[in-house]
Image (spheres, helix red, strand yellow):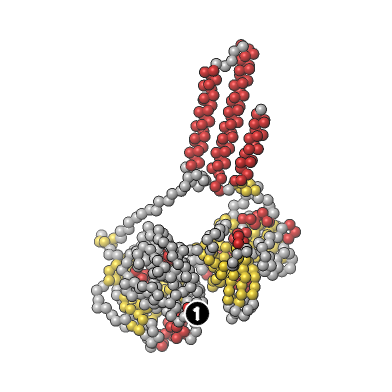
Amino acid sequence: MIRLTCKMTGLMILVIFWPVIDVYAQDGDKVAERFINNVLQLSVKFSNGVETNGFGFVVGEREGHLYAVTANHVLHHSDAPDVKTAEVKVRFFQDQAGKPVTGEALNVSSTEIDTALLRVPKPAWYQWERGVLSSGYKRGDRAWFVGQAGKWFIPTDKDAGSLYDSEPDLLGYVTLSISSVQRGTSGAPLFTENGIVGMVVLDEGDKALAVHIDQIRKLINRMCPVCPWNMEIYKNSPIIQFKEWSFGIIIIVVFVFLNLIILILIRNRFKKEDGARQKLSGTKTPPEKRGFKFRLAMISIVAGFVVVLLFIVTRSDITPFKPVSVTKPTASVTTTVKSESVPVTTVEPQTPEPAITNTIGMKLVYIQPGTFMMGSPPDEPKRYDNETLHEVKLTKGFYMQTTEVTQGQWRAVMGSNPSHFKDCGDNCPVERVSWEDVQEFIKKLNQMEKTDRYRLPTEAEWEYACRAGTTTPFFFGKCLSTDQANYYGNSPQTDCPKGEYREKTVPVASFAPNKWGLYDMHGNVWEWCQDWFGDYPPGSVTDPGGPSTGSFRVYRGGSLGLGAGACRAASRYWLSPVFRSYNLGLRLALSPD
């Protein structure tokens, strides 16, 4: 009876557990199930009419966009630098027959390690796996990839190769013996049983090269420190891996079946005792004694069950039953200096200066000196830790351009238009300009205007002018509507309604200005500032200009491609001075005489 009960119990446990466990074989197609939804199929068209195919894989996500890596030679025509990337079409494994999504080649790339970064709008239905990074590999590990010759393909058996060395070479390349790499494979993720180790970039006959994943991460961090990297270490369970939501169910089911076995054993023991007692004395166990033992056993079992159940429902990280409620902390921030309350914004009373319009149509308004609180309070939604709230005093007034520099204004000075959205027209903001490009523009503009006073605003001047005396996340208030700014409306500020996503720049001054007459301080394109990026000082400061040296320059204001959180007055980002992007432009300041 006991043997039969144990066999039936084991069979029932297997039947019940089967839907909540994942069983992994060690073949490449089984291991790749974890990674395949991350892989993107790319079709790239260049300005000279040449087309190429390849793959890439997702490494991060932010504000409704996916960030993916691929081979540089797939995304950029490396043999002819003057040939531009005209179009990038992206397909997802989950929707191979669907309409491709248009991606964007970012200016984060390296010909030396053949790596490039692209950004892709994330479809609402798309999900990708973050825990895919390799925790290490050794010489001889079997290796696979996803994607071959423009088709979804996972090499298995004889097509699978092995790694030559136990670590990448000095340039960060991983060498593998594999014969199935061919044209159209570039950009595919290379993985072992322990996760993704790199990206395939080159075929050399009976062997191939891949860029190691750490080298890819270093490139992105160096050239675009604000670009997201959300990949995590792959947790490999080669035999059985329980799905995350099932752990609590498994404990309960196991406990129930163990209790059933215990009850059967107790019942059988009572039967044996009755049989032995009846043989010796001709009597059975008194009912009250038998009932007491049985009740004691039941109470013990029920108590144990309650303890296990309480353990499960109080562990929010493993239970599928208990919803996790997050209460947003509220905090009031009071800043004092010398025991006196600091006014949030004060502007020195002065006679208003007249606005200035220069020879190429730039209009600049005078911003009076004053004191304000720079940064954001700890309870502001979507803030970052680098926005420490502190007092800033600006002792000198300055002029600020009322709009972003337009394509027409840039062409009037530089004789060319580098913008991605040229079709938008001369009254749209210029973009795809680096900080260094802007310095050349300012130099030539000063020569044209016979002055040396045009410059970029400091980060403090920019935020002071953007706020225009307000303390809310936006000068409009706590929410930012797409009727007030051009940004990714599907990602509004917390507890605010969604809006339109225009997917392109709009003419400057399309929306209402702040009360100091400045347009598009939120959204449309990012705006370079003069400062090197660095942490804010711990206390109050006067006329800050940022660190004296650095590696990255600050830019502010948000853009058409990011959500409301990035458009906040306090939101600050930083990039290499040579970086260019379709959503990165400028607004000028002018020092008074």
> For the N terminus, which image quadrant?
top right
Examine the rendering and report whether any part of residue 396 can be seen: no
Q: Can residue 488 be seen in this view?
A: yes
Residue drawn 40% across the image and 58% down it: 495
Is residue 29 shown above or below 116?
above
The crowding category of the residue bearing disc 1, from other C-alpha atoms within 10 Å (few below 14, some 14 to 19, many at least 20), is some
Name above or below for residue 295 compared with residue 546: above
Corner quadrant of residue 83: bottom right
Q: Which residue is drawn at 47% across and 42% down?
A: 314
The x and y percentages for residue 162 are 70, 59
Foreground of the two, 438 or 22: 22
Q: Quadrant of residue 28?
A: bottom right
Q: Is residue 4 left or right of residue 525?
A: right
For residue 219, above or below residue 418 = above
Type of the residue with mark 1: Lys
Pointer 1 residue:
422
Q: Residue furthest front?
A: 98
| Residue lying farthest to the top in this orientation | 281
Q: In which quarter of the image is residue 402?
A: bottom left
Instruction: Note whether 291 is above or below 61 in the view shown.
Output: above
Quarter of the figure with the C terminus: bottom left
Which residue shows up at 73% across the image and 64% down it?
A: 179
